Amino acid sequence: MKILFIGDGQLGQMLGGSAISHGHECLLYSTRSEKVKPLSAQIELSRSLAEAIDWADVVSWEHEDIPADVIAAANDKFLMDPARIKALTDRRTEKKLFDDCRVATSPWRSFNTADELEKYLADADQPQVIKAARGGYDGKGQWRFKLTDNPASVAQEAGQQPGIVEAMIPFSKEVSLVGARAKDGSLCCFPLITNVHDRGILSYSLGAIDAVPASWQSRAEEAFRSITNALNYVGVLAIEFFVVGEGDAADLLVNEIAPRVHNSGHWTMTGANCSQFDLHIRALTGMPLPQLRVEPTLMINVIGAEQIPAGLWHHADTQCHWYNKDPRPGRKVGHVNIRTANRDTALQWVGLWAEKLQVLS
Ligand code: ATP
Ligand code: MG
């Protein structure tokens, strides 16, 4: 098949690699330069977007912030209603989807003005997180409110644009579920992934390392089913959860969803018989979803570093991925997957390397 991906960042490149290995052809459309590009080369083709859409059998995306004119032009080639996906770029409609699907999420309100936000903060009886409705990623566009803070001054800063205010969740850990839904509604999910953030940015993920109660997996997959059914979704989607409490009695609260392949699923490039990128291509092209086999794998993000040290490229248990981006503090420029026996050895790797690989500010 011929696949056009909206977006030409690292996720688009990795999706393209999978498309090729399945015998498909692909082109990427940069929403930044508004040019069509081939895979892997930073070359702009003379082909217009309309021609690329005409060429493609199917259009997919690496990021959900798809410009309205692109949605209009490619409408017939998307496998599902892109307007619903676009709605997920606004935290208000995203949270409403969770409520509509009856999946638990942190209690939230939306606000339009600083005055409205100030009122909610003044009434709060527990700490709050304020998130801009649009444009946030890697912890950007977020503010924290403690009960000892002054509601008016926090609202002045955080209420400059519409957003949501939600309860700060005292989570015991953060996990994500990465999976795919096929056109016939069947699902295929990886085991829950443990994620550790540093200053709002994903630092590392433990793939198939933590044994979690079976009930967490089934509840997470139930949430996945409700949400992807509601979206009539085809392809890979990720759900981030806060876990509150321990063991079977713990609550899983949905934090946010990413209607695409996700950073916390990068370990599957090394630790699974079918990576999240391959899974997306399979779902997109109507191939059967696989039976998954996974192996314990740590993924450490490379953030703001100039390079990945040679020792890591050299090691037999590692797979390094460099995104060909200019490094700057806080910017994800690569990741390293490490085959590791268990949580203890994974955390030893983190202790040895995270600081060298991550320049956050
Ligand atoms: P991403 O890089 O995943 O797109 P983001 O900027 O969109 O991140 P969130 O995932 O909402 O934003 O928040 C980033 C991190 O901040 C979360 O993973 C979590 O560690 C922390 N966080 C966000 N909201 C809350 C909350 N309500 N309670 C506690 N911690 C929170
Ligand atoms: Mg997040």
Image: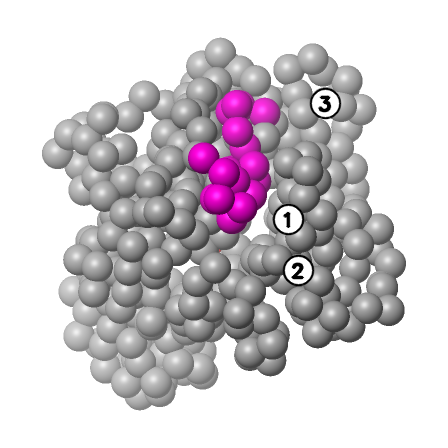
Q: Quadrant of residue 145?
A: bottom left
For disc 1, the neighbor class at 10 Å (few under 14, some 14 to 19, many from 20) is some
From mark 3 to mark 2, how far is it between C-alphas? 38 Å
Return the mark for residue 312: 3
Q: Which residue is mark 2?
A: 56
Give SS at disc 1.
loop
Return the mark for residue 53: none
The answer to whether residue 339 is above or below residue 178 is: above
Q: Residue at x 53, y 46 (%)?
A: 285
From mark 3 to mark 1, how far is it between C-alphas? 36 Å
Of the image marks 2 and 1, the number of the one nearer the N terminus:
1
Give SS at disc 2.
loop
What residue span does the magenta drawing correspond to? 270-288
For disc 2, the neighbor class at 10 Å (few under 14, some 14 to 19, many from 20) is some
For the residue pair 19 and 315, the one nearer the viewer reads as 19
Q: Which residue is mark 1?
A: 1
Give SS at disc 3.
helix
Q: Residue at x 75, y 32 (%)?
A: 308
Q: Relative to residue 299, is residue 229 drawn left or right? A: left
Q: Which circle, 3 or 2, is nearer the viewer? A: 2
Q: Residue at x 23, y 43 (%)?
A: 222
Q: Quadrant of residue 94?
A: bottom left
Q: Position of residue 313 (x, y in %)?
A: 76, 23
Type of amino acid under label 2: Ala
Q: Position of residue 318 (x, y in %)?
A: 66, 21
Is 25 a magenta residue?
Answer: no
